[in-house]
Amino acid sequence: MTKRFTKRLGTICLWLLVGALAASWALTAEGEKEKEKEKAAANPNHPPGFVKPEPNAVIQLWPGDAPGLVPGGKAETFVNERYANVSVPQLFVYLPPKEKASGTALVICAGGGYGHLSMCLHVENVVKLLHDQGIAVFGLKYRTRYGANDVAADALADGKRAVRIVRSRAAEWGIDPHRIGIQGYSAGANLALNLAGHFDDGDPKAADAIERVSCRPDFCAMMCLWPNERTIADYPLSKNSPPTFFAHAKDDTIAPISFAREADEKLRGLGVPTEMFVIESGGHGAFHCGMVDGPGARWPESLLPWLEKIKMWRRLPPTP
């Protein structure tokens, strides 16, 4: 009787110990999750472990005042890592290590409804990721609404100028002048769409050497394409528009997927190569690398093979 009781007591103690350990492990795991949440709450603009990339150069886009400058505008601000009231556009140059350079360049236009620029989310957070693939990054700080300016026209002019600058200095920066793309998020994607229908070969008679260079992007990547209260008929796309990659969530209520589908259909009808990366959910922030879970944050896994297919990017050889 005593032996049986002792054995049973030992079994009960063992199970109690196992239960206590399991509870402890669960609490530890839950604590780690809470710590991650606290980190994210402490820095909502960057993923854990983020190291801010330092640009190789910051270039003023235009000599003197930008064209069409409206006097009396609001002063530029930088709040929560968002630029607003931008009237002096700049280009942030981030070059990959020379041994990694693939020759491909990407001019990135952050989103913000033409009222501000979330370069923290859309440029800084992807610099390392793109550098690891040998892609040079150019963060375009284009003009936003700062007063009575025509913001869409200003942003388009800045997009054109940025592509011309990158192409004019391609040899200096180790870039193939025929592999320069533009990527935009939301309003930045609207800028890219606008440029896809309004590019030119440059003005050979221009006094400014940069203005003699073509501003046609060699490819576009439009993330959460925002219509800016226009229809696709308002964008004069043509058979010469650049090959375009679209990324969109079906549940995006700010930039409905129907507009991106119309743009895709119009380009395909013109014979322009396109690729549509669609996810079920995630909303307007579905493609923020390192900031969200889900397939949208892995958009490079869809973009890069497509760029390789259209010969706009070459895969780096494996490290021995």
Image (tube, rainbow, N blue to C red):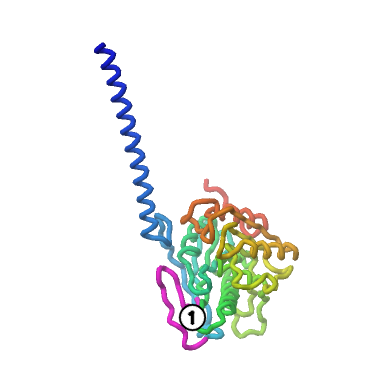
Q: State left or right for residue 252 relative to residue 232.
A: left
Question: For the residue carrying disc 1, how many other residues have a C-alpha within 10 Å: few (<14), some (14-19), or many (20+)?
Answer: many
The residue located at (30%, 29%) in the rendering is 17
Tell me which corner region of the image, top left, top right, bottom left or bottom right, holds residue 107: bottom right
Q: Position of residue 146 (x, y in %)?
A: 49, 80
Q: Residue furthest top?
A: 1
Q: Quadrant of residue 104?
A: bottom right
**Range of magenta residues:** 70-89
Residue type (three-letter) at the residue carrying disc 1: Tyr
- Magenta span includes 71: yes
In the rendered image, residue 9, in percent from the top left (x then y), is placed at: 27, 20
Q: Position of residue 153 (x, y in %)?
A: 59, 79
Task: Give the residue drawn at x 35%, y 34%.
Answer: 22
Q: Based on the picture, tell me whether residue 275 belongs to the magenta stretch.
A: no
Asked whether 290 or 283 is in front, the reply is: 283
The residue that mark 1 highlights is 146
Q: Is residue 50 left or right of residue 257?
A: left
Dot 1 falls on a residue whose secondary structure is: loop
Main SS, magenta region, reads loop
Whether residue 190 appears in this view of the structure is yes
